[in-house]
Amino acid sequence: MKTISMTLAVLLTVCALTHAQTPEAVKLVTDDGVNIVADYYKPKAAGSPVAILLHMHRSDRSAWKPLVPVLQRSGFGIMAIDMRGHGDSLFPSEMNLAQRSVDRDPTLYNAMYRDLAAAYACLSKRKELDMSRLVIIGASVGCSVAIDYGRRDRSVDVVVCMTPGENYLGVDSVDHIKKYGDRPILLLATEDERRAAEKLGEVNSTATVEIVGTGRVHGTHMFGEIDGIEKQIVAFVRDNVGPPNAKAAKRAGDSGR
C-alpha cells in the first residue's frame, strides 16, 4: 500500500507540473495582415512581469519549452510566438511566408518586429500582467528581431540574446543595437561564436557579453548542452526587469474583485 501511495503522489506531482506548463493557444494579427500563432503561459500572481520569446531561423515556439518552467517559477507571464513563415504562422497563403523563410528573404526577417508588436498589443490587454516590466528573449535571428523591436519600443526593459549575429538574414543588428541605448541587454555565445557578441558589445558598451561554453552550440540548442544556462538567463532578467508597478498591481487586483 505504501508503494501505491508513493506512486500516486508522484503521478499527481507530474500532473500538476504538466498543468502548470500548459499554454493557452493564441492567434494574433499583425498590422500588415500576417496571422501569428503563439503560446501564452499565464502567471500565478497578478501584476507579473512579462517575457516574450523569439525562436531561431527554421525553428518554432516549442524550442523554448526548457526555459518556460524556470521563467514561471520566477513569476513571469510568458508568450512564445511563431514568427512569420515559421511553425504555424504561415498565413495568409498569398504572402508565401513559408517559402520566403526557406529562401532567406531579408524583407521577411526585417518585418518580424511587427510580429512582436502584435504580441505586445495582445499582452497589453491581459490584466494579470505588468507591462512596465517587459523582457524579450531571442535566439539566433530571434536576437536580431528582439534588438530591432527594442530599439523601436522604449517600454522594453531587458533583452537577452542567445547567439546574436551582426547581420543575420539581412537584419542589421550592429546598427540597431546602437539605437537600443543603455537598457540592460545580455549577449550569450559559446567560444566558437563569440565574435558577433563581442562586436555588438563593442558597439553598445552597456551590453553584458558572456561566453558560456566551448565549441559551437547555437541559440536554443544551448538548452541541455550548457549547464545552468536557463538559470543564468532568468537571473539576469529577474535582476534587471525592475520593481513591480503599483498601478499595474492595483489594476490586477481590481479585476479580481
Image: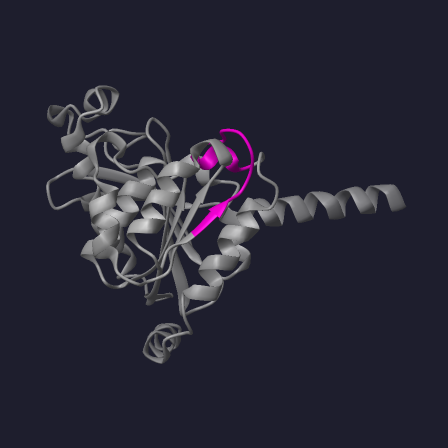
Residue 67, given in percent of the width and then of the height, sits at 50, 45
Relative to 2, 185 lies left or right: left
Residue at the front extreme of this rendering: 202
Of 111 and 78, nearer the camera is 111
Question: Which quadrant would the N terminus be assigned to in this image?
Answer: top right
Could you tell me which residue is drawn at 38 percent across and 44 percent down? 198
Relative to 92, 256 lies left or right: right
Question: Which quadrant would the C terminus be assigned to in this image?
Answer: bottom left
Residue 113, given in percent of the width and then of the height, sits at 21, 45
Q: Is residue 4 magenta?
A: no
Mark yes or no: residue 25 visible: no
Relative to 81, 31 lies left or right: left
Of 231 and 72, nearer the camera is 231
Q: Is residue 220 magenta?
A: yes
Could you tell me which residue is drawn at 53 percent across and 42 percent down? 212
Residue 153, given in percent of the width and then of the height, sits at 21, 58
Of 176 and 239, nearer the camera is 176
Residue at the right extreme of this rendering: 1
Q: Quadrant of residue 46?
A: bottom left
Could you tell me which residue is drawn at 45 percent across and 44 percent down? 188
Which residue range is magenta in the image? 209-223
Up-down relation of residue 77 to residue 97 (above or below):
below
Residue 160, given in percent of the width and then of the height, sits at 40, 50
Mark yes or no: residue 72 visible: yes
Q: How many marks?
A: 0
Up-down relation of residue 167 to residue 102 (above or below):
below
